[in-house]
Amino acid sequence: MRDFIGNPSHNEVKHFTEGQNPSGRKVEVTFKDSEVLVGSTMGYDPKRPGFFLFPPDPRSNNLKIFVISAAVSKVRYL
C-alpha cells in the first residue's frame, strides 16, 4: 500500500491494457464473496496458503495484494 489515505479522485484501472506485459502470469481471481480482482502473479499454487497478486494499474494505491487461497473460489489465467 502506498498510503492509508489513497487518492479518492483516481479511477483505478481494473484490467490490463494493450501492450502491457507484467512479470508473471495474468490472472482473474474470483473470491467466495463474488469479488473479482485482475492482476499478475509469479507464484499461484492452489495447494499453498496464498499468493501475491500485482494490480494492473501502476498508479493504484495497492502495490501488491496477498491473496488467501481459502478465500478464492476460482482462478482463471488470462
Image (cartoon, rainbow, N blue to C red):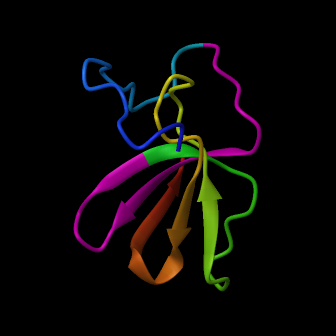
Horizontal side of residue 67 vs 72, given as left or right: right
The total of numbered circles placed on residues is 0
**Relative side of 31 to 24, left or right:** left
Q: Is residue 20 magenta?
A: yes
Along the line of sight, the residue nearer the viewer: 48 or 19: 48
Residue 16 position in % (x across, y down) = 51, 26
Query: Does residue 77 show up magenta in the picture?
Result: no
Q: Where does residue 65 sit, x and y in percent of width and height?
A: 54, 55
Residue occupying the point 44% across, 57% down: 29
Choose top left, top right, bottom left or bottom right for residue 14: top left
The answer to which of 67 and 10 lies nearer the viewer is: 10
Q: Residue furthest top?
A: 19
Judge by depth and name the residue closer to the eye, 60 or 31. 60
For residue 21, above or below residue 74: above
The percent coordinates of residue 51 (x first, y second) are 64, 67
Question: Which residue is found at the position 27% from the left and 58% from the top?
Answer: 35
Q: Residue at x 46, y 44 (%)?
A: 38
In the rendered structure, the answer to whether residue 42 lies left or right of residue 53 reads right
Give the position of the C terminus as an image quadrant. top right
Quarter of the rendering containing residue 73: bottom left
On screen, 12 above or below 36? above
- What span is colored magenta in the figure? 19-37
Q: Residue at x 51, y 75 (%)?
A: 68
- Report x, y in % for residue 21: 70, 25
